[in-house]
Structure formats: C-alpha cells, structure tokens
Image (cartoon, grey):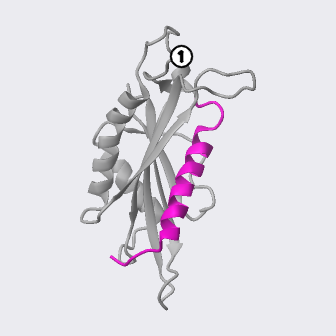
Amino acid sequence: MSTRPILRMSAAVALLGLVSACSLGGGGESGSGDSGKKGSGPTYRQAMDAMYPDALAATKAAVPGIEVEELPGGNTECGGADVLDGKDASKLRASAAIRIPLETSDTRTSRELVNAVADQLAKRQWRKDPSERTTPPGHEDGALLQMKKSGVRGLIEITAFPTPEESGEKGETWQTLLTNVITDCLRNPEWKG
C-alpha cells in the first residue's frame, strides 16, 4: 500500500467530526427519554460496546486483506442545560471511526463501497435508516448511509468518497472508506454533579 500524507488522515478525521455533526443535528438527543432517575438507563459505553464490534467486522469483511485504521473519536457532552444553554457531562455521546484508504486498483465506486459495508451489517440485523443526506459534506461525488439496529442506542454511518492522488504523475483517484460509530446521548456513570 502506498504511503498517504498525514494531511489526508487529518482531513478524514475532520470529515468524521463534520459528518457526525451534520448527521445528528440539533435534535439527536434520543437518549433524553430515560426515566429521569439518576443512574438509570444505558451508558454511552454500553452503547459503543454494542455497536463497535459489528462496525469493525463489517468493514473488514467488505474490504478483506486491507489494514484498517481505528480512530477514537472521543465524547461530546450532551447532558442538562446550564444558564447559557451549554451542556454538562451528565450524559455523553461517544464516537469512533474505522478508516480505510483503498488502493487505486480497487475500482468500486463510493456507493458500491458503502453498500458492501451495509450488506455486511445487514447480516448482523442492522437496517438502513432513511436520512436527509446521501452524500458526505464537501464530497458531493461520495456516498453516505446510516444504519440502525433494534434495541441499540446509536447509529453506524458509512461514508466513502474519492480523493485525487497528489503524489505521482498518474493523477489517479483512490477511495477513502469511513465507518463511523455514534452513540445516542446517554448516561455518563462517572458524572458526580
């Protein structure tokens, strides 16, 4: 596999954050319907533990023989509002991503790559989630698909987009495949507030 500049990896990580923010929008607090009792409901970690293994296995199966990059995305505070309408850490939304920069010899389109991961997830009882966006922000020639699973508090978002080869003289294009795992806004068991 050819070495890609670090700049490309940073751009992919930035895209992860942008795609996640656009996908979840302002009303993505589906975890706020818990009973309201302190310490009740699932935690953000439990949701991530329920989703990430499926996402990793499906991505590896869709692109066998290629080493994946596992990118921890971190947590976002989404708990109760303060006086400035900020959020506290009583609830968190966790995210992580699996990234694969494919070789130019893989001639699948962005949509074909996204569908390959989606097909693998479907074998694990994940279903396509109708969403407003079908292309990733800033990559209108790419493809995006969200998937959900009954009883799981979050979603898996599959994104693929072509990237021009900057090094070399061929001017080839290679695909980047990202599988993002994003939990709902869920209880943070470490919160002491």
The answer to whether residue 181 is seen in the rendering is no
Q: Secondary structure at mark 1?
A: helix
User: What is the residue that sits farthest to the front in this orientation?
Assistant: 192
- Judge whether residue 163 can be spotted in this image: yes
Q: Is residue 156 above or below residue 98?
A: above
Please check the rendered image and state whether residue 5 is part of the magenta-colored stretch, yes or no. Answer: yes
Compared to residue 153, the image places residue 12 above or below, namely below
Residue flagged by tag 1: what amino acid is it? Gly
Which residue is nearer to you in this view: 134 or 179?
Answer: 179
Q: Quadrant of the C terminus?
A: top right
Question: Residue 34 location, x and y as percent?
Answer: 50, 14
As for residue 63 lying within the magenta part, the answer is no
- Which residue is painted at 45% across and 37% down in the image? 155
Q: Residue at x 56, y 56 (%)?
A: 14
Residue at mark 1: 33
Q: Main secondary structure of the magenta part?
A: helix
* Quadrant where the N terminus is found in the figure: bottom left
Magenta region: which residues? 1-28
The part of the image, by quadrant, that contains residue 142 is: bottom right
Residue drawn at the location 38% of the way across and 35% of the way down: 48
Going by the picture, which residue comes out furthest to the bottom? 169
Whether 163 is drawn above or below 157: the answer is below
The residue shown at (38%, 49%) is: 118
